[in-house]
């Protein structure tokens, strides 16, 4: 390293490049296991490791340079065919990747490498280079008696804990106990991990991450977290996750070393200042880091609640913008176009534009790339495939797609269930796939994209697909539907039976699926955030789940309608189309009013009927009908008058009114009146109940 080299000048460039290469390694290493002979994939991994080696060496980060150098040599042996790609080799490559991530995070936070041990990993790489086999990495875990639980750490983990305390970090031993009736223990644990990884690093879990993922634990798990957050903040972050019975947090104790650092650090700033001013030397020069910590990005940490409050204030501005525009229009209609009114109109338009831009910026502040959820799936799929003895090519598309954080928090569990089902039920065994003339390796694809004001997420596989007749037979066997109703179902409606509570086609209960508590929970989670899930499946060709979600839950576009003098809002995400029906077009089937739309039977209901509003139905020759759909076939709802589309701010009905059937909330209109937002899911369920009751009678 040349004298006078200023590390801060190039650190951001190095970190950006490291992030890019780590992302390449993360995807490519997992894919390599499923495509062992893919030379292009191996070359991508080799180039990423080579780039990391060169950039880290030029920056003077010797540990990263050393690890990537030996990793590059192992990859070269793989490219030359001298070493075969085995599960143990993949485990070793992933272990290298984990260490590289730890080193990168140290550099990002401190501007230099910490004391993370790399010798043991480098020894494993040397073993491969010497031509011997790779031993599996086993970690011994034990607990003390009398409830004083103690996680036994290996040498590397002890080094990480000791270094963390020396730098003034907290190291917490956390025990999380889930509710005894929690039906999704694995996904719930993943949410806890994901939340904690935003404030620190998890260096150990008990049971292992793989066992927790496979739900091979009762209702309790332990983890060791390194973080700058104190006990109360960590506890509040975990406590924000639902279905958690209890949380126990205490500092990690290194019994063998009797270190004073195991006490909770009190003079954190002093330690950081000391670290920031210590001399750092290498073979070529000695430099002193400035007392001011090296800045790696211009960002500010903002409490989520502040963003929520800001979003509420913007919502109020949106309401007043609409009201101001309405007042201006009314004055213009009554008084004509006087100069003062023109000025008012100009001001109204300007305020509308500024409010719209402010709203857009606040929305962006709440948006996160969906990769925060997607990035944890490749390794989960790999581990599930290994346990199931299946070969999976897992593809992820659209990681950069952004959506509201409140929506992101809700989609993790459903996606885990869909991916598990794809591997357990969808993809056949390699032997069976070969007999069917398919590649031994099954395809599972997860993708995300924007479509207008929605985000669309798909999970598809090229597996066995779903047989509607088998699904109907299983539903009849379980008493979920009678034979007469089953006979009337279309193939698509038959497939949708998998969403009924208690339905499962699994012959055996496994740690992945088969308990019949999966798909109904998936749909409930999605519909709870005004989303829609749809299935397309072909026997022998595969299954595709399509999930459509709103970009945000705070503000959305709705169709406004009138019922007498009351105004109601249909969320546009649930509206299929608007039609006008003539009185003589309405037919009756089993006392149910229907109309034919493009050759399909559409059941008709009045809005007052679904909301249990008592009134005399007006006599008309034609009816405006709003066609809505939630998962299953569409339903037509007759209204008095269509008012048009409008952006609305969703307000809760409050604790006094509570949950009102058929209503999801309220909004304030431009004239100051309140419009009620319809719960389309509740209305459709009510409509289905009415329809089946009429058929039964």
Image (cartoon, rainbow, N blue to C red):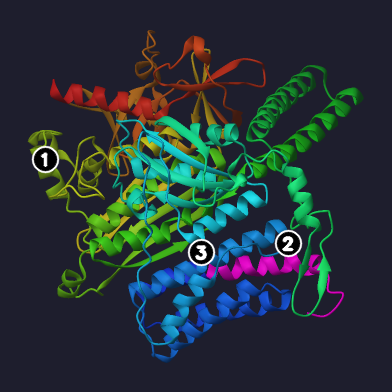
Label 1 to label 2: alpha-carbon separation: 68 Å
| Residue lying at 10% horizontally and 38% vertically, measured from the top left | 476
Q: Say left or right for 485 vs 68.
A: left
| Residue lying at 44% horizontally and 36% vertically, measured from the top left | 574
The reply to whether callout 3 and callout 1 are in contact (CB within 8 Å) is: no
Which image quarter holds the N terminus? bottom right
Which is nearer the N-term, disc 1 or disc 2? 2
Name the main secondary structure of what is drawn in magenta: helix
* Number of marks: 3
Measured as percent of width and height from the top left, residue 411 is found at 44, 44
Q: Nearer the viewer, residue 192 or 674?
A: 192
Which is nearer the N-term, disc 2 or disc 3? 3
User: Mark 3, residues whose alpha carbon is within 10 Å: few (<14), some, or many (≥20)?
Assistant: some
The reply to whether callout 1 and callout 2 are in contact (CB within 8 Å) is: no
The stretch of residues the image draws in magenta is 1-24
> Is residue 396 inside the magenta stretch?
no
Q: Which residue is mark 3?
A: 98
- The answer to which image quadrant residue 552 occupies is top right
Q: Say left or right for 245 vs 367.
A: left
Q: Which residue is mark 2?
A: 111
Q: Secondary structure at mark 3?
A: helix
Q: Nearer the viewer, residue 11 or 322?
A: 11
Measured as percent of width and height from the top left, residue 583 is found at 34, 25
User: Mark 1, residues whose alpha carbon is within 10 Å: few (<14), some, or many (≥20)?
Assistant: few
Label 2 to label 3: alpha-carbon separation: 19 Å
For residue 47, say whether it is visible.
yes
Q: Which residue is mark 1?
A: 487
Which image quarter holds the C terminus? top left
Q: Is residue 573 above or below residue 682?
A: below
């Amino acid at each position: 390293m040349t004298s006078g080299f200023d590390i801060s000048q190039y650190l951001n460039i190095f970190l950006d490049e490291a992030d890019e290469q780590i992302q390449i390694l993360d995807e490519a290493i997992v894919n390599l296991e499923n495509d062992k002979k893919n030379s292009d994939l191996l070359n991508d991994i080799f180039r990423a490791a080579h780039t990391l080696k060169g950039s880290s060496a030029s920056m003077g980060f010797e540990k990263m340079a050393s690890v990537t150098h030996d990793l590059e040599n192992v990859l070269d042996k793989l490219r030359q065919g001298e070493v075969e790609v085995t599960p143990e080799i993949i485990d070793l490559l992933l272990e290298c990747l984990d260490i590289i991530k730890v080193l990168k995070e140290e550099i990002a936070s401190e501007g230099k490498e910490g004391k993370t041990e790399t010798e043991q990993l480098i020894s494993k790489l040397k073993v491969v280079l010497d031509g011997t086999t790779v031993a599996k990495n086993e970690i011994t875990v034990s607990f003390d008696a009398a409830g004083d639980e103690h996680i036994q750490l290996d040498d590397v983990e002890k080094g990480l804990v000791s270094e963390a305390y020396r730098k003034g970090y907290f190291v917490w031993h956390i025990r999380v106990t889930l509710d005894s009736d929690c039906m999704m223990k694995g996904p719930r644990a993943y949410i806890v991990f994901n939340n904690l990884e935003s404030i620190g690093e998890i260096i150990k879990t008990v049971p292992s991450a793989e066992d927790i993922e496979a739900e091979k634990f009762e209702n309790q798990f332990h983890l060791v977290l390194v973080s700058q957050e104190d006990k109360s903040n960590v506890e509040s972050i975990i406590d924000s996750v639902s279905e958690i019975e209890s949380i126990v947090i205490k500092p990690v104790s290194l019994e063998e070393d009797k270190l004073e650092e195991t006490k909770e650090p009190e003079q954190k700033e002093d330690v950081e200042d000391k670290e920031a001013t210590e001399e750092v030397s290498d073979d070529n020069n000695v430099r002193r880091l400035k007392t001011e910590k090296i800045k790696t990005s211009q960002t500010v940490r903002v409490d989520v609640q502040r963003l929520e409050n800001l979003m509420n204030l913007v919502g109020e501005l949106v309401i007043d913008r609409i009201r101001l525009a309405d007042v201006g229009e009314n004055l213009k209609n009554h008084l004509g176009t006087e100069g003062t009114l023109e000025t008012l109109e100009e001001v109204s338009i300007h305020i509308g534009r500024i409010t719209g831009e402010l709203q857009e910026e606040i929305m962006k502040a709440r948006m996160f790339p969906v990769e925060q959820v997607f990035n944890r799936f490749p390794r989960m799929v790999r581990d599930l495939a290994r346990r199931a003895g299946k070969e999976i090519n897992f593809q992820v598309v659209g990681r950069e797609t952004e959506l509201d954080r409140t929506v992101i928090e809700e989609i993790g569990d459903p996606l885990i269930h869909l991916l598990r089902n794809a591997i357990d039920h969808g993809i056949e065994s390699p032997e069976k796939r070969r007999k069917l003339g398919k590649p031994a390796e099954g395809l599972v694809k997860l993708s995300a994209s924007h479509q207008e004001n929605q985000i669309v997420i798909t999970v598809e596989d090229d597996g066995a697909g779903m047989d509607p007749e088998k699904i109907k037979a299983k539903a009849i066997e379980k008493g979920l539907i009678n034979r007469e109703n089953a006979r009337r179902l279309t193939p698509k409606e038959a497939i949708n039976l998998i969403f009924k509570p208690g339905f499962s086609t699994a012959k055996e209960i496994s740690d992945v699926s088969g308990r019949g508590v999966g798909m109904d929970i998936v749909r409930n989670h999605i519909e709870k955030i005004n989303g829609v899930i749809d299935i397309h499946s072909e026997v022998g060709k595969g299954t595709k789940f399509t999930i459509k979600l709103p970009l945000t839950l705070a503000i959305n576009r709705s169709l406004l309608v009138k019922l007498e003098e009351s105004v109601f809002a249909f969320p546009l995400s649930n509206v299929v189309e608007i039609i006008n029906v003539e009185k003589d077009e309405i037919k009756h089937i089993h006392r149910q009013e229907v109309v034919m739309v493009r050759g399909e039977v559409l059941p008709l209901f009045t809005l007052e009927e679904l909301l249990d509003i008592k009134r005399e139905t007006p006599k008309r020759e034609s009816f405006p009908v709003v066609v809505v759909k939630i998962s299953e076939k569409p339903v037509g709802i007759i209204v008095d008058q269509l008012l048009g589309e409008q952006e609305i701010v969703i307000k809760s009905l409050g604790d006094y009114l509570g949950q009102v059937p058929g209503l999801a909330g309220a909004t304030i209109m431009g004239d100051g009146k309140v419009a009620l937002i319809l719960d389309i899911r509740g209305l459709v369920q009510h409509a289905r109940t009415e329809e089946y009751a009429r058929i039964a009678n």
